[in-house]
Image (cartoon, grey):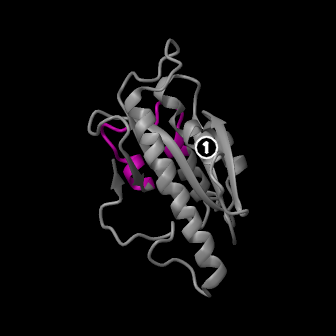
Amino acid sequence: MSGWQVIGIGSPFGDDRAGWAVIEQLEQWTLPADVSLLKLDRPGPALLDWLNRDTNTVLIDAVQTSNHPCGHWMELSLGQLDHSNDLSSHGFGLAQTLALARALGQLPQQYRLIGFCIPPGASTPAQSDLSVAAAAGITRLTAWLAQQLEATSAQSQTATGSGGVGSIGSSSRSDRSRR
């Protein structure tokens, strides 16, 4: 297993474009050669076509919530996505798709699910532009993610093991939520 695929999930509507915007910004960075970038439009179960047990994967998706300000982002577990009260993957079944991938043995061995907070109603067909708050959060998330991917790539080239402080596969922080 080597390299990472980063999948931005979204739609063309307002702040729901967050996952796509992260991918668009990452395309401007010089990333390790073993990183691939992909934008998907509300894939639902078709996401399974892009998941592979042997491919490290980062999934970035906007989540509608009033518990955190727009632009805040956090790493989520499947359990958090499944059992959240005021957190939504805006109706296209990401939690169910990832649970199905796990049941089919198709969930990547190493993955990160990043929820990018947007307010309820911030992704209607009448909206096409990102809000100022979402754009600022996307820039912060992109910079952090690019640094993590670079560190992971450098570490995999020099280390005989996997993981470690500074890799995308682990964290020395107990609170992995970011603003």
- Is any part of residue 96 visible from this angle? yes
x 59%, y 42%: residue: 25
* Residue in the image at 67% along x and 49% along y: 37
- Residue at 68% in and 63% down: 32
The residue nearer to you, when weighing 12 against 77, is: 12
Name above or below for residue 131 compared with residue 4. Answer: above
Residue at disc 1, secondary structure: helix
Give the farthest residue toward the top: 126
The span shown in magenta is 78-96
Question: Is 42 contained in the magenta span?
Answer: no
Rendered location of residue 28, percent (x, y): 64, 46
In this rendered view, identify the residue nearer to me: 75 or 51.
Answer: 75
Q: Is residue 87 magenta?
A: yes
Q: Is residue 42 toward the left or the right of residue 170 in the image? A: right
Q: Which residue is mark 1?
A: 23
> On screen, 104 above or below 136?
below
